[in-house]
Image (cartoon, rainbow, N blue to C red):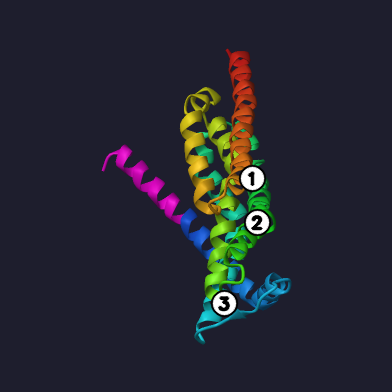
Amino acid sequence: MNDQAVNVIQHFEELRKRLIIIAVTFIVFLALSFIFVKDIYEWLVKDLDFKLAVLGPSEILWVYFMLASVVAIAGAIPVAAHQIWLFVSPALTKAERKVTLSYIPSLFFLFLTGISFGYFVLLPLVLNFLMALSGEMFTAFFTTEKYFKFVLHLTLPFGFLFELPVVIMFLTSLGIINPYSLQKIRKYAYFVLIVVAILVTPPDFISDILVTLPLLLLYEASVSLSKIIYSRKMKKQEALQ
């Protein structure tokens, strides 16, 4: 077996090790989340103007599992980011390791910010609009499973979308992308973000605007941050020459 094949096997073994650590971390956080999941559930439903119903004995268990999973994902994000950093760090310089390591806490806080935006801003907007559509023509009847699926679809995607600036800064630091490539694909990125905004909001112009604007601002902030990182990287390279 030649050296190249050995290196490939070693890389796969290292990747397998990192993935196992991430999976175990998620499972541990999932188990811990179940201890407090009832309190989380009661906090989420305490201000609702309507009662939630269950159609079967397993439905509330499914909801508890879903809530615990979201908490576990949030808790596992810093560990997952650190494991990814450990996997790629041998290919980085000492300065790049130090800089990219500092991004890890930001991933966690931006994920929580995105979840909060979806829950406290987007969810009331969409829910009030849909309730207004029914008016007095229908009797609103919400099952626990369908309501929390609805909440999940409106919050979890924004947790990941709000991490876009840090991800782009990280990729810029590694030299995988640069701000000029981001500028070239701006119109395609805008199109994708607008489609996402339309898909997760009710069919009215105001809601689309309220969701689209933060997403476009996130992209522009990502481009600006990428410029800063890229400029610093170029200056360091020039200084070394």
Q: Are marks 3 and 1 in contact (CB under 8 Å)?
A: no
Q: Main secondary structure of the magenta part?
A: helix
Residue under label 2: 125
Mark 1, residues whose alpha carbon is within 10 Å: few (<14), some, or many (≥20)?
A: some
Front-most of residues 192 and 87: 192
Q: Quadrant of the N terminus?
A: top left
Q: Are marks 2 and 1 in contact (CB under 8 Å)?
A: yes
In the rendered image, the residue lying farthest to the left is: 1
Mark 2, residues whose alpha carbon is within 10 Å: few (<14), some, or many (≥20)?
A: some
Does 27 appear above or below 217?
below
Mark 3 or mark 2, earlier in chain: 2
In the rendered image, the residue lying farthest to the bottom is: 57
Does 43 appear above or below 215?
below
Q: Amino acid at mark 1?
A: Leu
Residue 232 is left or right of residue 2, and the answer is right
Q: Which image quadrant for residue 132?
A: bottom right
Front-most of residues 214 and 112: 214
Front-most of residues 56 and 50: 50
Is residue 151 visible to us here?
A: yes
Q: Residue at x 49, y 54 (%)?
A: 18
Where residue 141 is drawn, which disc sits there?
3
Q: Is 10 covered by the magenta stretch?
A: yes
Work out how far the residue at label 2 is from the one at label 1, CA to CA, in angstroms: 9 Å
| Secondary structure state at the residue bearing disc 1 | helix
Q: Residue at x 61, y 58 (%)?
A: 126
Q: Amino acid at mark 2?
A: Leu
Residue span colored magenta: 1-17
Mark 2 or mark 1, earlier in chain: 2
The percent position of residue 195, horizontal first and vertical second, equals 48, 44
